[in-house]
Image (cartoon, helix red, strand yellow):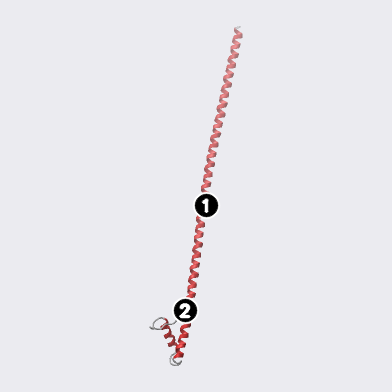
Amino acid sequence: EALKSACEFAREAEQQAKRIADAEKAAADRAAAEAKEAAEREAQRQIDEANAKAAQEVREANERAAEAERQAQAERDRIAEQERADAAAKAKADAEEQARIADQAHRDTIIQRAAHSLMEAVEFEQISEPLALEIMRAIADGDVDCVSIKF
């Protein structure tokens, strides 16, 4: 009976040791699984953080590129507007110069006609054409009081 009791005791001790070993193994497995999950979560968090940072950097780079393009377009628009303004100013100056030339030609024609009329009025031989033109220019320039020429 003592032997039986010792065998049972040994069996119980062995079973107890096996249960403890199984429990320790299960605890170790759980701890390993939890550590693995924690490591995977941390790795995923770092990946997510890196992805978010990369996405933010891409957004910022895109914003900088868009701003640079807006500035470049504004500069192109400014240059085009300046070129249009310069062309308009040149066209206006050219038109004014043409008008001045046409007006001067018109005045010269009127002065010449007036000089010929003056020469005819005082007999052609008494007043020379250069003198008649000089008189008419003096009148046109306002150098002769009470006399004017209508252009």
The image position of residue 83, as x and y in percent, is: 50, 64
Give neighbour class at mark 2: few <14, some 14-19, many 20+ (Cα, 10 Å): few
- 18 relative to 101, above or below: above
Q: Residue at x 58, y 24 (%)?
A: 26
Amino acid at pointer 2: Gln
Per the image, label 2 sits on a secondary structure element best described as helix
As rendered, which of 30 and 99 lies closer to the eye?
99
Residue 126: percent from the left, percent from the top?
Answer: 43, 92
Looking at this view, name the residue that lies furthest to the left. 145
Question: In the rendered image, which residue does mark 1 sit on?
Answer: 66
Q: Pinpoint residue 110: horizontal percent, then vertical percent.
A: 47, 83
Indicate the quadrant where residue 48 lies. Answer: top right
Q: Looking at the image, is mark 2 or mark 1 earlier in the sequence?
A: 1
The quadrant of the picture occupied by the N terminus is top right
Residue 116: x %, y % from top left: 47, 88
* Badge 1 element: helix
Residue found 59% across the figure and 10% down from its top: 6
Q: Is residue 137 above or below residue 63?
A: below
Q: CA distance from mark 2 to mark 1?
A: 56 Å
What amino acid is labelled 1 in the image?
A: Ala
Q: Decide: marks 2, 1 in contact (CB < 8 A)? A: no
Q: Residue at x 49, y 65 (%)?
A: 85
**Residue occupying the point 53% across, 47% down:** 59
Disc 1 residue crowd, few under 14, some 14–19, many 20+, Cα 10 Å: few
Q: Which residue is mark 2?
A: 104
